[in-house]
């Protein structure tokens, strides 16, 4: 059975920029955050995995937004017994679920600190953020408190 523990978590980058968008008071903007995740193994120590989770909101000409936002968190995990592709998928989902609440709070705090209406991301399962994690079974995972720190 795969076992992992979060050893470190860092906000790698947090940025907020107001965009000069001309809009009437009743204009509604469609804010769709883009999420990305990278998982890397440390070659010097195969038990260490680095997980980078990012939320980005960018204004474009086709889809103007009142602000640009970037929140990127880096988690360092010690992982044991990750042997199969399914173990890797389970770790990716669980690592996402571990880091996402911090990312969610950062997005809310960044927007609130910028004196705009706070943007609160929804509470979601780690298995639903990225399509690759959904898999054929679409099952939910239970956390074993003895395994997850």
Image (spheres, rainbow, N blue to C red):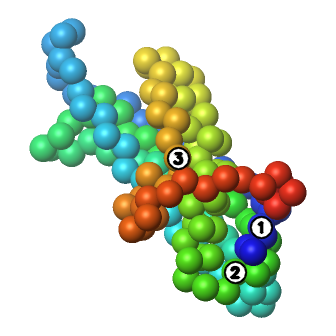
Q: Is residue 15 left or right of residue 51?
A: left
- Most extreme residue toward the top is 25
Query: Where does residue 80 sit, x and y in percent of width and height?
Result: 79, 78
Quadrant in which the N terminus appears = bottom right
Quadrant in which the C terminus appears = bottom right
Q: What secondary structure is found at the residue carrying circle 1?
A: strand
Asked if labels 1 and 3 touch by Cβ distance under 8 angstroms, the answer is no
The residue that disc 1 covers is 4
Query: Where does residue 146 sit, x and y in percent of width and height?
Result: 87, 57
- In the figure, residue 62 lies in which quadrant? top left
The residue that disc 2 covers is 82
Looking at the image, residue 37 lies above or below residue 9: below
What's the distance in space between the residues labelled 2 and 3, CA to CA?
Answer: 21 Å
- In the figure, residue 39 lies in which quadrant? bottom right
What's the distance in space between the residues labelled 2 and 1, CA to CA?
Answer: 9 Å
Looking at the image, residue 73 lies above or below residue 7: above
| Other-residue count near label 2 (Cα within 10 Å), few / some / many at <14 / 14–19 / ≥20 | some
How many numbered circles does the render carry? 3
Q: Is residue 12 visible?
A: no
């Amino acid at each position: 059975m795969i076992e992992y523990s979060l050893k470190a978590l860092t906000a790698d980058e947090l940025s907020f920029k107001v965009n000069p968008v001309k809009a009437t008071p009743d204009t509604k903007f469609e804010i769709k955050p883009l999420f990305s995740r990278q998982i890397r193994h440390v070659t010097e120590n195969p038990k260490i995995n680095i997980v980078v989770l990012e939320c980005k909101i960018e204004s474009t000409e086709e889809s103007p937004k009142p602000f640009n936002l970037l929140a990127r968190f880096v988690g360092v995990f010690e992982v044991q017994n990750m042997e199969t592709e399914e173990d890797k998928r389970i770790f990716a989902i669980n690592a996402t679920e571990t880091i996402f609440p911090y990312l969610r709070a950062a997005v809310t705090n960044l927007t609130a600190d910028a004196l705009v209406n706070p943007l609160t991301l929804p509470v979601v399962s780690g298995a639903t953020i990225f399509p690759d994690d959904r898999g054929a079974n679409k099952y939910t995972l239970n956390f074993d408190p003895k395994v997850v720190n």
